[in-house]
Image (cartoon, helix red, strand yellow):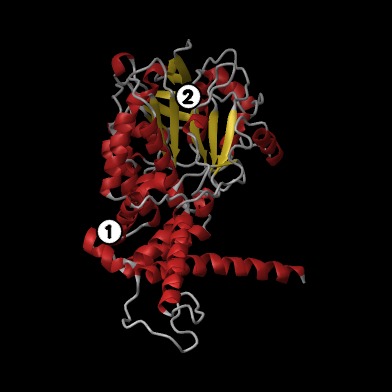
Amino acid sequence: MVDETSIFIGASRKPDDSYQRAEELLLRYGNRHGLVTGATGTGKTVSLQILAEGFSNAGVPVFCADIKGDLSGISMMGEAKDFLVKRAEQVKLDPYQFQEFPVIFWDLFGEQGHPIRATISEMGPLLLSRLMNLTEAQEGVMNIAFRIADEEGLLLLDLKDLQALLANMADRADQLSARYGNVTKPSVGAIQRTLLVLESQGAANFFGEPALRIADIMRTTRDGRGAISVLAADKLMMNPRLYATFLLWLMSELFEELPEVGDLDRPKLVFFFDEAHLLFEDAPKVLIDRVEQVVRLIRSKGVGVYFVTQNPLDIPEKVLAQLGNRVQHALRAYTPREQQAVRTAAETFRPNPDFDCATAITQLATGEALVSMLEDKGVPAMVQRTLIRPPSSRLGPITPDERRKIIAESPVAGQYDDAVDRESAFEMLQKKAKEAQDAEAQAQQQNSGGSRWTIPGFDDVLGTGNRRSSNRQTVAEAAIKSVVRSVGSSVGRAIVRGILGSLARGR
């Protein structure tokens, strides 16, 4: 029925509802991308699960997000339930074997999996601006910040690095505007406020080091199966922009790091974007164009990208055109937009004379889908009404104890647990300010002839000696004030709050 060159999806049916043939995804076209769509409760998660199982058994690593926690069951062996056994018989899956799969759990917050981190520099100004929903003027300031960091050798690793650099830019606004374009203090202040919101939402856990190594999501086991990296995204979905930005960053990292390999007999990695509408919702055109370019070109690097969403209209047309393997679950057609979605979905398939595709989409039962995979020479197969096969792993979530055990036995256990804070922009600006402060103190002492004592940054503390004839700040004073603002106002207050909080709790 199927062989090691394909993944068994299910069985299509004839007009009289009898068995027709096995529907399969050819592994050599697994990097031609795909789309899984359908309304809530129609079986999209199970389709994602069986595709992930198939790729894993074929030795292909998988990365996917677990929005509701249901996908975590892929790490445990399935159980012979009546409705699963019945479906296996209907699609002629014989033998129907249960299996657990090698899973690595990840979590941006480090609670339900290994922490995932990226540096500010790796994220880049475009994705950060998207994450922060910046205006065009604010995005321009963000681009200037990255340019300054590059020119001045300032490493941007975590949020406090970016905050310190922005504070420094605010104090040098006039000087920077003359060189790079308009840098206004209100724009910088707006970005700083947005960074504080991100920090309060937990984004500080994501930005920093050690950053995720791409090799760790491209692992295979000793028995040749591909590891399935599952991102715990139930809490992450409370901040959908962070979720979408993280996935876009990861895809762009794959694109930048992996070498060109052309068409292989199977992909090197398959990447599932669940809730794909979040990637494109309110996204600027430049970002959509970049995603379309990456999706188009990443195929030659052996990576297959599969979008999972409720509505095919969620995917921009240029991106939709790149998706060759398609699984369409039922759609509702109550509103004009839903009716348009049904028509769009029907028109993207190669027609089947045995049934009307648009009508069938609204009549599909749970666990049933219209399937069209790429055939020989990469041509889309005629769409077929298909019963999706049952999964071999557990259907439903795992328990917290089971999750903890898997995390403890993970091949990356301990590698990402502790954050590393090495010298970067924050410390470098702090060091420059200290050097400027020392130079200022030394200059003041020389001007006074060493006959009086002074406090750095204050003239004529005792009311004696010479005052500076000009009210203009020196470069040293500007640097001092910049770092004092960024360090003293944020970190200083955080330390005070921490001390007072612990004393209050100890009473």
Of 183 and 302, the residue lying toward us: 183
In the rendered image, residue 364, in percent from the top left (x then y), is placed at: 43, 32
Relative depth, front residue between 127 and 96: 127
Is 101 in front, or is 192?
Answer: 192
Question: Can residue 77 be seen from the camera position used here?
Answer: yes
Q: How many numbered discs?
A: 2
Give the image location of residue 294, x and y in percent.
Answer: 32, 35
Check disc 2 and report its element: helix, strand or loop.
strand
Where is 237 relative to 179, above or below? above
Above or below, comparing residue 212 to residue 18 in the picture: below
Identify the residue shown where x is 40% and y is 33%: 254
The answer to whether residue 201 is left or right of residue 316 is right
Residue drawn at (63%, 35%) of the image: 413
Mark 2 or mark 1: whose residue is earlier in sequence = 1
Report crowding for label 1: few under 14, some 14 to 19, many 20 or more residues within 10 A (C-alpha): few
Determine which quarter of the picture holds residue 83. top right
Q: State the separation of the CA atoms marked 2 and 1.
A: 48 Å
* Mark linked to residue 387: 2
x and y percentages locating residue 323 in the rendered image: 33, 30
Does the rendering let one see residue 372?
no
Q: Is residue 107 left or right of residue 428?
A: right
Question: Residue 109, percent across and down?
Answer: 57, 48
Judged left or right of residue 177, residue 240 is right
Q: Which mark is residue 234?
A: none
Q: Residue furthest right?
A: 507
Identify which residue is drawn at 59% across, 13% down: 95
Residue type at the position of mark 1:
Glu
Identify the element where label 1 is drawn: helix
Position of the C terminus, as image quadrant, is bottom right
Query: Amino acid type of disc 2?
Result: Leu
Q: Which residue is mark 1?
A: 136
